[in-house]
Image: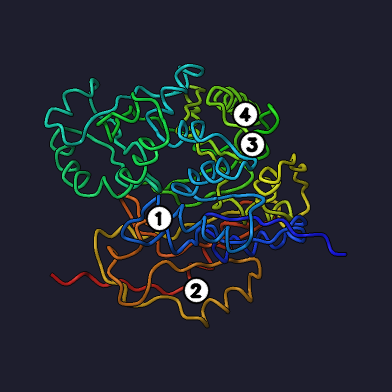
Amino acid sequence: MAKKKKKVFVVGLDEFNLSLIKQLPEFKECKILPAVKFSEIRGVEDFSIPDLLKKTEERVNEEGGIDAVVSYLDFPGSVMVPIIAGKYKLPGPSLESVMKCEHKYWSRMEQHKVVPDNIPKFRAFDPFDEKAYDKIGFKPPFWIKPIKSYHSYLAYKIKNKKQFDECMEEVREHIDYMVEPFSYIVSEFGMPKKISESKEKMFAETPISGHQCTVEGYAFDGEVVIYGLIDSVTHNEYPSFARYQYPSNLPYEVQYRMSDLSRKVIKQIGLMNSAFNIEYFYNEEENKINLLEVNPRMSQSHADMFYKVHGISHHHVMLNLALDRRPSPLENEGDFEVAAHFMLRTFRKSGIVKEVPSKEEIEKVKKKYPEAEIKISAKKDMDLDDIEEHHIDSYSYVLAYINLGGQTQADLLEKYDDVVKNLTFKIDPAQK
């Protein structure tokens, strides 16, 4: 008699991540189901957390039960996991520990308790307070960010009060898109009053700079394990990402220090039975590591890189934790020594996309580089402003995501340059 498959529900299920999950050895014992589909929480004008939870409950009931719940997505995916796990008494992190990561100001307060020398100065503020600039308490330059955002949405580097006031107009118009659903979780699920009753939806922090790197790890059975470090390479003139590259080029001594800091922070937050990733800056001149942010999930942007290098994606870690099992170590059994997730951007302020790569162009590239994964974000005749919000930061628009592998970094970058030359994008000025 065939063994009954475990019903694993995914918050934000999409075809790309499903294709990687299907290649895991654990897949044969699982039935992968959508708690919420990717299209139901991304590229939508707004979403209701209660409605998404109700939809999940209906799908669980239709399947006759649930054995595990996972997500590789930022909010609301990361926050829905502990809520669903708690409701059905499944393995997973506590909601409060996840919120201590996702609420960026609360997270800073927790980080300050254990690694005060490795974080910037920070201060929360109400974006609707006319005196907010004066109350921040430190002079520019500084960054302003929502207490909850993704892909640098509504994050700005402030140089003076005039720029701050201009940015506040944009912030006030769009801040509720992310913060209101997030505030629902804070107020409805018993978070501390200092968090739930706060009007401070934005916070400011002093700049940190250097070589940006992300630590991937997990917490299980009281132990915090680090299994990979990924470089985040930005464009020369902008703070927008050009690519993620794995493995990291940082000196091993620096990588060990980042790993130690990560263990301290995760234990302070109390995150357990969960994957996580923590972003850092390493300032080589000062030999100093600064922590940027903590995310209580695996990064899906890194998944294909792990697959290319290890022969298995780190969905393996996510899935085993959800099944209450310690993940096996990742072996170097992939086809490549190095891999990257590139973001092909335009830094135009506005424009109309008049031409995008044809199927023939993409097929030609993939024939030359079989490992290439290409996802086009822009569409023909689309205004750049209409590219879905999760593809946008405050400085640029992502036209395409390109995943490649190589035997050396030079080999990898040469491939990318060749791919870009063979993909046609044309953008005309927007008509006034």
Mark drawn on residue 422 = 2
Marks 3 and 1, how far apart at CA: 26 Å
Q: Nearer the viewer, mark 1 or mark 2?
A: 1
The kind of residue on which mark 2 rests is: Asn
Task: Locate residue 238, reporting x and y percent.
Answer: 35, 46
Task: Locate residue 151, reporting x and y percent.
Answer: 40, 48
Q: Nearer the viewer, mark 1 or mark 4?
A: 1
- Quadrant of the image containing the N terminus: bottom right
Precedes in sequence: disc 3 or disc 2 = 3
Do the CB atoms of the residues marked 1 and 2 lie less than 8 Å apart?
no
Label 2 environment density (alpha carbons within 10 Å; few <14, some 14–19, many ≥20): some
Precedes in sequence: disc 2 or disc 4 = 4
Identified at 60% across, 35% down, the residue is 250
Q: Which residue is mark 4?
A: 259
Picture quarter containing residue 7? bottom right
Side of 115 relative to 144 (left or right) = right
Q: Nearer the viewer, mark 2 or mark 4?
A: 4
Q: Which residue is mark 3?
A: 273
Q: Which residue is mark 1?
A: 51
At mark 3, the secondary structure is: loop
Residue nearer the viewer, 417 or 431: 431
Side of 304 relative to 24 (left or right) = left
Q: Is residue 414 visible?
A: no
Marks 1 and 2, how far apart at CA: 44 Å
